[in-house]
Amino acid sequence: MSSRLLYDTRDNSILRCQPEPSGSAELPSIEALYKSARIAKNDKQYMNSIIINENIITHEAQERLRIVELAGEIQAKEKPKLTIVPNTKELDTAVNNILTLTLEVTNMLSIDNITTINMSINDVNFTVSVDNNIGSKDIELTEPDTYIISCSEDRFIFQQVEVEVI
């Protein structure tokens, strides 16, 4: 089964994705997607749609996919995968208060050029420089707490990690 994906041509953001209904009904029209996504009349000129060979809904499409132009063709491709690896899951500040984060980016396309990644730790933002798809950052943590580390960008597929500081 397939789905019709509506995206904004100004920034290639995915606005709506509707799978093919079961039974004899066809894929929704682009007009139906405009209504479903509540696209203003004057914004319709910036919209386009493509059909993908997956049966997914909007949330999953926004989480996993991105719209790119490859070889002159607009396509929906998987986002790059970001792996966040702390040097420890439990940091004892009596021994060491430096947490080292290593980031690795995989599933990249030839058009990708990733040099920095915006991250957050308990809602405090920071940037990690990336070279050859790998980046590293030392972070000083002194307060006992459970810290949530995540990517603050939507251009990656990632899992946040937790580190407990004791």
Image: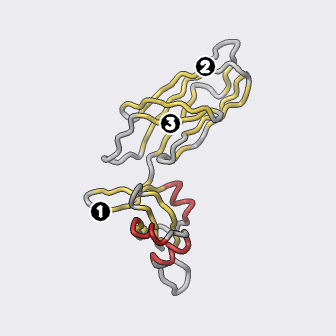
Q: Are marks 3 and 1 in contact (CB under 8 Å)?
A: no
Question: Badge 1 is on which residue?
Answer: 73
Which residue is rendered at x = 50% and y = 36% of the image? 118
Location of residue 151 with respect to 127 vertically, above or below: below
- Which residue is found at the position 58% from the left and 38% from the top? 150
As drawn, the residue found furthest toward the front would be 42
The front one of 91 and 145 is 145
Can you say whether 97 is above or below 106 in the image? above
Give the image quarter of residue 108.
top left
State the image coordinates of residue 154 (x, y, percent, origin top left): 51, 47
Q: Which residue corresponds to mark 3? A: 118
Three-letter code for the amino acid on which mark 1 is drawn? Glu
Residue at mark 2: 140
User: Which residue is at the front of the view, 165 or 34?
Assistant: 34
Amino acid type for the residue under numbered disc 3: Asn
Q: Position of residue 19 (x, y in %)?
A: 52, 72
Q: Residues within 10 Å of mark 3 (few under 14, many from 20)?
A: some
